[in-house]
């Protein structure tokens, strides 16, 4: 589980790698630069859903980022589904 600031632990990174290896089929080629060098982000990030009825307080979704080292393209995956957060 990430620390209080959302930083992923070495165990979290291993869990993400294990999940990735189980679910991703074939090489991952970046759709932008066509390279295949990727790195897991260091923190859980949160995306807020659009909410005009709750400005500033919209519900959020915890995400894990996978970043292309060459061009900075970002893939996002649900932290709960991967098992990083309950």
Image (tube, rainbow, N blue to C red):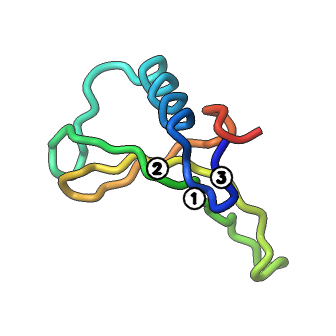
Residue extending farthest to the bottom is: 55
Question: Could you say whether the residue bearing mark 1 is in a helix, strand or loop?
Answer: strand
For this view, does 16 lie left or right of residue 3?
A: left
Q: Nearer the viewer, mark 1 or mark 3?
A: 3
Q: Position of residue 7 (x, y in %)?
A: 56, 54
Q: Which mark is residue 3?
A: 3
Number of residues whose C-alpha sits closer than 10 Å to that of mark 1, classed few (under 14), some (14–19) or many (20 or more): some
- Mark 1 vs mark 3, CA separation in Å: 13 Å
3D distance between C-alphas at marks 2 and 1: 8 Å
Element class at badge 3: loop
Q: Is residue 9 left or right of residue 2?
A: left
Residue ID at (38%, 53%)? 74
Sequence-wise, which precedes: disc 2 or disc 1? 1
* Disc 1 to disc 3: CB gap under 8 Å: no
Query: Which quadrant, please, contains the C terminus?
Result: top right
Q: Residue furthest right?
A: 53
Whichever of callouts 2 and 3 sits on the residue coming sooner in the sequence is 3
Q: Residues within 10 Å of mark 2 (few under 14, many from 20)?
A: some
Circle 2 residue: 65
Q: Residue 58 falls in which quadrant of the image? A: bottom right
Residues packed near mark 3 inside 10 Å, few (<14), some (14 to 19) or many (20 plus): few
Q: Which residue is mark 1?
A: 45
């Amino acid at each position: 589980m990430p620390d209080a600031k959302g930083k992923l632990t070495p165990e979290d990174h291993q869990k993400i790698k294990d999940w990735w290896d189980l679910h991703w089929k074939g090489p991952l080629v970046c759709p932008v630069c066509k390279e295949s060098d990727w790195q897991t982000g260091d923190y859980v990030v949160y995306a807020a859903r659009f909410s005009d009825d709750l400005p500033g307080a919209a519900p959020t979704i915890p995400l894990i980022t996978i970043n292309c080292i060459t061009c900075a393209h970002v893939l996002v995956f649900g932290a709960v589904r991967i098992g990083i957060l309950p």
